[in-house]
Image: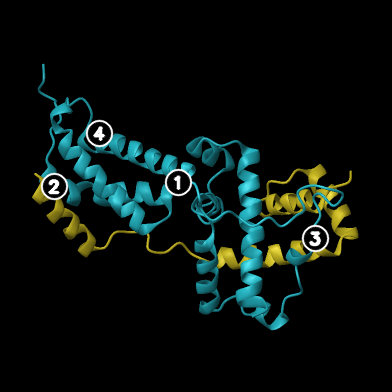
Amino acid sequence: MSTNKHTLNPNKWVKAHADYLFNYTISRVNNHEIAKDLVQETFFAGLKAMKNFQGKASERTWLISILKRKIIDYYRKINSAKGKAEVKVNFYTDGEKEGEWLEERVPTNWNNEAEKNIENDELKEVLETCINKLPEKYEMVFRMKTMQQYETEEICKELDITSSNLWVIIHRARTQLRKCMEDNWFNK
Amino acid sequence: MKLTCDEATTICDKSQYGEASFWEKIKLSFHIFMCKNCSLYSKQNAVLSKCLQKQKCKNNCLCEKEKSAMEEEIKVKI
């Protein structure tokens, strides 16, 4: 009884599925190049695994299941990437002053004129550069939360982290971002 | 009731996403009332949120050129 069996047609993969797979990926990795590479790798892996395709699921579902694995592998890779730029600490971590601002990291007043100019295109660029300077994992969590507006729970599930983990990451990302914007825009 | 600056700024970050609890917000305002640095941080954090709001996600699709390059590569491997 195999009249409804699905088939694979690699010649049409890009046309039929590239956009869908790319959208699925970009919302999870937030980087155009990386998302493109993951989609490409998914197609290659699909070609290799064609003989294992049993026709039970549709072509797209099958490709998505490969893509999901690729994305998880990517997360694992950046999670374990050692020697990545660490986020700067902003507070004393021990001693009498534990939890207080480090003197050199204390916020300074921003130039009022710069604050009025937040519609500015140049500011967008500076902000983007500052976000890109964050360590990869921080950048990903920060973008998912801030730009894509994922629910906290969703991010935790997807990345397998706890919510307190998530807030520590957001906190460090934001303090670093604040400092970066202070140095490169508001008090330049 | 007493927060460190580290804790206070974390709550301030949470509240940027509307996810600080009522009690946390009270503790935060109390801390901000007494702490000049965190008061400034909190103000600037709000400005930062405003800037981020304006920042739209861009580059969120594949262009035709990229797709045809992909197609070529797949043809090679088939």
Three-letter code, disc 2: Lys
- Provide residue A123's location: percent of width, then percent of height: 55, 75
Q: Helix, strand or loop at disc 3?
A: helix
Q: Vertically, is B39 above or below B19?
A: below
The residue identified by callout 2 is: A12
Three-letter code, disc 3: Cys
Query: Could you tell me which residue is drawn at 75 percent across and 61 percent down?
Result: B42
Chain letter of disc 3 in the image: B
Q: How many marks?
A: 4
- Provide residue A74's location: percent of width, then percent of height: 39, 43
Of the image marks 2 and 4, the number of the one nearer the N terminus:
2
Viewer-side residue, A85 vs A50 = A85
1 and 4 marks in contact (CB < 8 Å)? no
The residue identified by callout 3 is: B38
Three-letter code, disc 4: Trp
Q: Colour of chain A?
A: cyan
Front label number (4 vs 3): 3
